[in-house]
C-alpha cells in the first residue's frame, strides 16, 4: 500500500463534480474538488483538509510546521491552479480572493540548485500536493472578515518524459576514452534541470536538450563499472536514476 503525503479528503464540506469549461475556456474544477468555509483563528480556526494550514488573525494562510506554501497569483478558478513552477516557498502567505495556492509537505519536497522545488516520482512514496483557491471572503457586517471560502483538491506530480525512478537509463562507455573526455546524451526536451552526485569523478552539464558528462577521475578501487546518482527535474516533478560508467 502506498503512503500518501496528504490523506484522502475527509472534511465537513461537499464534494464538487468536475465542471465543463465555460465559453471563455476557463478550466473547470478537477474531479474530487471540495469546498470549505475556513474561519480564521479568532472565529474557529478551521484547518484545511488533513494539513496544518489555517488562516490567522492577520488574514494569512499559515502552516506552522509541515507545509511549504506557494502563492501562484490570480487564477480564474481551481482548475487553473497548476504546480508546474514552484518557487519561493513560505510558511505564511496572504489570503487573497481569486488567488491560487499550492501546499507541499516540506519533507517530501527537494530544492534544486535553481531554487525550484520539486516532488519525487518515487512510486513507493505516492507523493501528492494540495492545491487550493480562494473563492470568496467570509464577511460580517459588524466583525469584518471572518475567513474565506476555499476550494481545494489533491494534485499529483506529472511524469512528463522523465525516466522511471531507480532505473539506469544512461550508460557511458569510457573504455576507449580518457580523463576529460565528454559523452553527450540527448534527452526528449530541453526544459529540465540536472543534479549529479558524481563523487568528484564524473561531472554533468546541461547543454540545450543534451546532458554532457565528463570523466574527471577514474572510479575508486579499480572498478571497471561505476554507478552515480542523477536527479532530473521537469516542472514540479523529479526522478532519481543511476548513470552507469564503464571504464
Image (tube, rainbow, N blue to C red):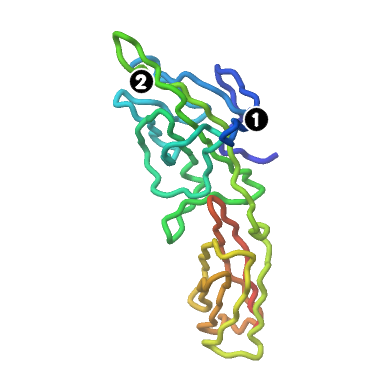
Q: Residue drawn 62% across and 45% down?
A: 125
Number of numbered discs:
2
Q: Position of residue 150 (x, y in %)?
A: 48, 25
User: Residue 227: which quarter of the image?
Assistant: bottom right
How crowded pointer 2 is (Cα within 10 Å; few <14, some 14-19, many 20+) is rated as some
Q: Residue furthest right?
A: 1
Residue 138 lies, with reference to residue 6, above or below; the image says above
Decide which of 84, 240 is in the foreground and name it: 84
User: Residue 224: which quarter of the image?
Assistant: bottom right
Q: Position of residue 238 (x, y in %)?
A: 57, 55
Decide which of 178, 17 is in the foreground and name it: 17
Q: Residue furthest front?
A: 23
Quadrant where the C terminus is found in the figure:
bottom right
Q: Are marks 1 and 2 in contact (CB under 8 Å)?
A: no
Residue 53 lies, with reference to residue 123, above or below; the image says above
Quadrant where the N terminus is found in the figure:
top right
Q: Is residue 81 left or right of residue 58?
A: right
Q: Residue drawn 63% across and 39% down?
A: 3
Q: Position of residue 185 (x, y in %)?
A: 62, 74
Q: Is residue 67 left or right of residue 231?
A: left
Q: Which residue is mark 1?
A: 20
Q: Which residue is mark 2?
A: 41
- Viewer-nearest of labels 1 and 2? 1
How crowded pointer 1 is (Cα within 10 Å; few <14, some 14-19, many 20+) is rated as few
Distance from disc 1 to disc 2, alpha carbons, whole Å, reads 35 Å
The numbered disc on residue 9 is none
Amino acid at each position: 500500500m502506498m503512503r500518501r503525503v496528504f490523506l484522502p479528503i475527509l472534511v465537513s464540506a461537499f464534494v464538487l463534480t468536475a465542471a465543463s469549461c465555460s465559453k471563455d475556456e476557463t478550466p473547470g474544477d478537477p474531479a474530487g474538488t471540495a469546498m470549505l468555509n475556513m474561519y480564521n483563528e479568532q472565529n474557529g480556526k478551521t484547518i484545511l483538509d488533513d494539513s496544518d494550514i489555517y488562516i490567522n488573525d492577520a488574514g494569512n494562510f499559515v502552516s506552522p510546521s509541515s507545509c511549504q506554501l506557494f502563492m501562484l497569483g490570480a487564477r480564474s478558478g481551481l482548475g487553473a491552479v497548476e504546480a508546474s513552477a514552484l518557487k519561493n516557498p513560505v510558511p505564511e502567505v496572504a489570503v487573497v480572493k481569486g488567488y491560487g495556492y499550492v501546499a507541499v509537505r516540506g519533507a517530501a519536497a527537494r530544492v534544486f540548485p535553481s531554487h525550484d522545488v520539486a516532488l519525487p516520482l518515487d512510486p513507493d512514496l505516492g507523493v501528492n500536493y494540495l492545491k487550493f483557491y480562494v473563492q470568496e471572503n467570509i464577511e460580517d457586517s459588524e466583525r469584518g472578515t471572518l475567513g474565506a471560502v476555499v476550494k481545494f483538491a489533491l494534485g499529483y506530480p506529472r511524469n512528463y518524459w522523465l525516466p522511471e525512478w531507480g532505473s539506469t537509463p544512461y550508460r557511458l562507455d569510457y573504455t576507449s576514452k580518457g580523463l576529460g573526455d565528454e559523452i553527450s546524451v540527448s534527452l526528449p526536451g530541453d526544459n529540465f534541470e540536472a543534479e549529479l552526485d558524481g563523487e568528484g569523478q564524473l561531472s554533468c552539464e546541461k547543454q540545450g536538450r543534451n546532458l554532457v558528462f565528463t570523466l574527471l577521475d577514474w572510479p575508486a578501487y579499480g572498478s571497471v563499472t561505476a554507478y552515480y546518482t542523477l536527479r532530473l527535474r521537469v516542472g514540479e516533478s523529479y526522478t532519481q536514476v543511476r548513470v552507469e560508467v564503464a571504464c
